[in-house]
Image: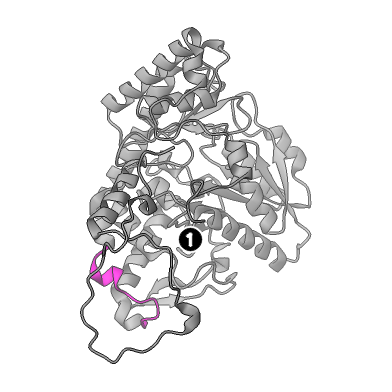
Amino acid sequence: MTDIPTLYELSVPGRPGTSLPDCDVPPAPLPDDLVRADNGLPELSEPEVVRHYLHLSQRNYGVDGGFYPLGSCTMKYNPKINERLARLPGFAGLHPLQDEASAQGALELMHRLQEALKRIGGFAGMTLQPAAGAQGELTALLMIRAWHANRGEPGRDVILIPDSAHGTNPASATMAGFVAVEVPSDGRGNVDIEAVSAACDDRLAGIMLTNPTTLGLFEERIDEVAALVHAAGGLVYGDGANMNALTGIARPGDLGVDLMHFNLHKTFATPHGGGGPGSGPVGASAALAPYLPGPVVEMDGDGRYRLETPARSIGRMCAFHGNFGMLVRAYASIAGHGDSGLKANAMAAVLNANYLRVKLRDRYPVPFDRTCMHEFVCEGRPDGTRARALDVSKRLMDYGFHPPTNYFPLIVPEALMIEPTETETLATLDAFVAAMLAIADEARDRPDLLHDAPHTTPVRRLDEVRAARELRVAEPGDPE
């Protein structure tokens, strides 16, 4: 429970929070059904309201406040210069219905971002339409369906999904009308090549590959997988959520990937969390580019920019031009770092993850203990104790760290998925290691400390199953 009083508890009858000027037009009566004698709203001064919400905000944990090693989600620091650029009046105040002639600057930025993402990913075409990574997945799958239908093969309805894929992949495949078929991983954490080969028949529409995988590992036989799928008439979709490990080092389009979405927050430092705002641009090979959703930005011979819809486009995936503010931030990140900076980011992310993996692996088992990419997965059962991943994560809060991802991917028991990103210092990584090792000692010597954690947070451990089933967002006695 929180010790911050609610606005209702702070309320004092007659205390004003606003000061409005005298009305300079004749007042008009409000409809009776809009007027209530007592609307039940608290009465407070402006400073009281500001302080209340400030105190609440200080109870939140964010990447601006501390280390946030949330594997798969990539909670990296958002440079403040990018935020300032997105708020420039010419960008922030632009109306999406303005004509092309008065929006040339915005269109130029979108075109530059398209071209940069095409070059980074090794693709011939790019759309900025999708408003999230998961919508980027759906976009690519709808393009795959349209491509097969146009070739007279609508019966191709199977999408292969490795058991190390991102969790949204099966849902996206189902939403696009496909049958999702899981394929296992092999002993090194790669997709099982024999299982892929056995599934390559005339129903195969494609495969969804997360590379690096959610195990934090590079698919060592991706070229063989792509060759098998292509030989069977299928397409290779790349889940590009983990491009933070590959940018400037490897291009998915060169590895046989036909379609791929980027998560701008994971690789190019746009904000993440709270369900948005998101952006999941999709890149496509030359054969698939005509199916991209529109509009995309083209440049005429005279240097003017215009919006164009590809010839076989699957249509819009988002109103207007996508989450434009995120596009500004991503372009600022790419332009600010340049080719060498983006590559350095990827190398630092991989270095940081491997540093943590090696420091922790003697106490927290790493099931696929080979050089990882930007993240790694260990078991949250230190030293073979009876501690669980949830116990370790809850205890980490007492040490001032946000927990890593729990229980994902599903193929690792008691999984802890740790991603340090490239923006954390060695001192921060060492402090995290020290906390994890201390927790391992506690799991052996004082297990109740873990089972009852967290001890220092405003809200103690909840019954999360019950909370999900019996949703209550108000205190007892508060107005509902």
Q: The N terminus is located in which quarter?
A: top left
Q: State the image coordinates of residue 225 (x, y, percent, origin top left).
A: 63, 40
User: 371 or 273: nearer the eye?
Assistant: 273
Q: Position of residue 255 (x, y in %)?
A: 52, 44
Count of numbered labels shown in the rendering = 1
Above or below 257: residue 106:
below
Could you say where residue 33 lies in the image, as x and y percent from the top left? 50, 80
Q: Quick check: is 188 in the magenta stretch?
A: no
Residue type, mark 1 in image: Ala
Q: Residues within 10 Å of mark 1 (few under 14, many from 20)?
A: many
Q: Which residue is mark 1?
A: 131
**What is the x, y in percent for residue 413?**
61, 24
Q: Is 89 covered by the magenta stretch?
A: yes
On screen, residue 138 versus residue 402, left or right, reads right
Residue closer to the observer: 157 or 221: 157
- SS type, badge 1: loop
Residue 100 higher or lower than 269, as above or below = below
Is residue 308 visible in the rendered structure shown here? Answer: yes
Q: Is 370 rendered above or below residue 167?
A: above
- Residues in magenta? 87-99
- Residue at horizontal 56 percent and vertical 27 percent from the top: 415
Q: Nearer the viewer, residue 234 or 181?
A: 181
Q: Residue furthest bottom?
A: 26
What secondary structure characterizes most of the magenta part? Answer: loop
Q: Which picture quadrant has residue 248? A: top left
* Residue 378 visible to an observer of this rendering: no
Identify which residue is drawn at 38% across, 54% down: 8
